Amino acid sequence: SAPETEAFEDAEECARVLADAMSLKKSAVDYMHPEVGVTAADGACFGRNYFNRYSAPETEEDEFADERAEIMEEAAALKKLATDFMHPEVGVTATDATLFGRNYFNRYSAPETEDIEDAEEHACVLADAMALKKSAA
């Protein structure tokens, strides 16, 4: 009555499944918390690049630099939108003066205004009424 032992293939499969689960968990955490950032301590990350060093001559053309600047602006805007989407609890802040202005034309306490056509028709009706009043008198 010895305890059952796993076969070698089953142990390898179990180890692969657990490794996949751990990598999926890491991916999910990275996705849900983009503000954490990326950390790397690999020695290759700190290697010296002789092609892009400061003393190297400039090799980028102006149109590529402009396009790169536009891409960076778009990426910054997309990052802001992604942060706003992922964190709706932050809310919206705005300090534009026009947001606090009043509309004096459509408020409830504003006097009613007539259209030009209605005013002309009103004047015609009053003129007809005055003419009828004169003819009746």
Image (cartoon, grey):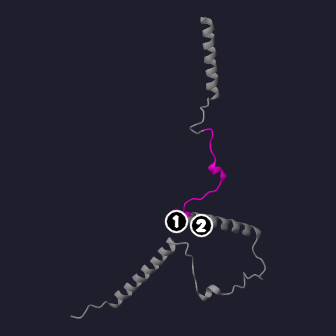
Say which residue appears at 63% left-offset and 40% top-offset.
104
Q: Answer above or below: position of 6 versus 57.
A: below
Three-letter residue code for mark 2 = Lys
Say which residue appears at 61% left-offset and 31% top-offset.
113
Q: How many angstroms separate mark 1 from mark 2 (CA)?
A: 10 Å
Q: Answer above or below: position of 111 versus 79.
A: above
Side of 80 where 15 appears, left or right: left
The residue that mark 1 highlights is: 86
Residue 129 location in percent, x, y?
60, 13
- In the image, farthest residue toward the left: 1
> Which residues are drawn in magenta?
84-105
Side of 126 where 27 appears, left or right: left
The residue that mark 2 highlights is: 79
Q: Secondary structure at mark 2?
A: helix
**Snapshot quadrant of residue 128:** top right
Residue 90 location in percent, x, y?
54, 63
Depth order, front residue of 63/133:
133
